[in-house]
Image: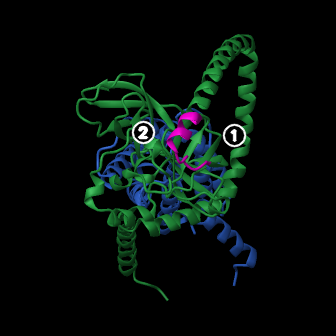
Amino acid sequence: MTTTFWRRADLLASAVTPFCVTLLLILSGLVHSRVPELASVAPVLPLAAIYFWSVYRPGLMPYLAVFALGIMFDLLSGVPLGLNAVVFMLVRLITVSQRRFLVGKPFLMVWWGYMMIAAGAAFAAWVLSSVATGRLLPTLPPVFQLLLTVGVYPLVSWLLVKADAGLVQSEA
Amino acid sequence: MRVPATFKLAIHRLSLVLLFGAAFGLMMIGKADTLLVERIRTGVVDAVSPVLGMLSRPAATADIVVQEIRALTHLRAENAQLREENERLLRWQTLARRLESENRALKELLLFVPPPEAAFISARVIADAGSAFARSVLINAGRRDGVTKGQAVMHGHGLVGRVAEAGHRSARVLLLTDPNSRIPVQLEQSRSRAILAGDNTDLPRLNFLPEGVEVQPGERVVTSGHAGAFPPGLPAGIVTSVTEAGVRMQPFVSTARLEFVRVLDYGLDGILGADITQELKATTPASATAASPPHPGSVPADRPAEGTQRAP
């Protein structure tokens, strides 16, 4: 037995960190900002985390975790239950399938990939909530939300790199 | 023990399909059994509301600092403006006093039964729970403070929305602008009724206005008190545009700067009260078509308002 107790504790901490960080992003995105009309265009912060770990450590962001995070986000933000669970899982599915074009590539390339995927996610969310509400919803808020979601990616990504650096370097 | 790779892949694919199925299934359940989903929602919101309350403090502090600086720069101009406004309001006050005493005298003549007095529950907004597809806020008062589903929520002099879900120590307020918000209202001048319907824009629409009603931009919109939902006469907003496409209203309260709100407790059932459906069954069709009194405010509160039959 080479795995000591501390090694195992390290692995466990590494396994739950992505989930906890994403949850924290969900909560901080909800904080009442008092900036006029921010709530309707506020960036979807957890999307960046799901993308980031799907690219660099898909093993630390399994589908079950993505599903749970999506449900949590739905429950808290008051949108139809299951909507973001579907969107987040789609994001992970597509990101993982495109991993080989993203891993080890310059940041701008990864950012470009994020823009593509976030656009798809925004469209999927718009379609799903229109179906759930029973009529076509305005398209302008999701477009602005998408711009912000893509715009804050460098900042969120910088934070995620910091969080990721603390994790055990083996793929859990 | 080693599991064959193909078997592993199959398990992986199956679990993915199951999870997608579960997510879509939850969307269906959310449509069909709203009560169950609501209970889960309030439970989760209750659990994280202390965290959200704590996180909202630094944001509030930063906001106060910015506002203080802004206020200092505009102090002189604001002072002059307030003086002028004060004078105007004093004139209004005199008028209001006179009308109040006149009103009281007339009511005594009519043996009028006054509507119930409102109790207020003040609460702090702890989260902007909206997204690009929904508009709601979370407040830090719940059932333990007397907040129940369906109550009207005000800020200052204007309607903000209604309580959509009430947890133990938190509640979700559905704003007027949410696509699911429907509130029975009335134009103040013409007394024509309409349904104020949010559609995720800043200017909710007035639906189901009677044919041939002349609506002018600038007319005030107040709650009508129909459907037993809200007390009549709560100011909601001002008509901004009347076009072919419909009539739109600017709410009095901008939801952007909500910090504290007041939840109104009139002892009514609320917009989704269980009693409404029972009353619906109890009332005969004849009374449903009975002419409505000119002022819905004069309907005695202990009797169901005639509007209860119009519950959506």
Could you tell me residue B4's position as x and y percent?
40, 83
Crowding near pointer 2: few (<14 within 10 Å), some, many (20+)?
few
Rendered residue at 37%/81% (across/down):
B7
Range drawn in magenta: B104-118
Q: Tell which chain the image draws in green.
A: B
Kindly identify which residue carries mark 2: B295
**As displayed, is residue A73 above or below residue A116?**
below
* Disc 2 with disc 1 on a shared chain: yes
Alpha-carbon span between mark 2 and mark 1: 44 Å
Q: Tell which chain the image draws in blue.
A: A
Rendered residue at 26%/59% (across/down):
B285
Check residue B59 in the rendering and tell me which mark sits there, or answer none: 1
Rendered residue at 71%/13% (across/down):
B83
In terms of depth relative to the viewer, which is nearer, B149 or B41? B149
Rendered residue at 65%/71% (across/down):
A12
Q: Is residue B184 left or right of residue B288?
A: right
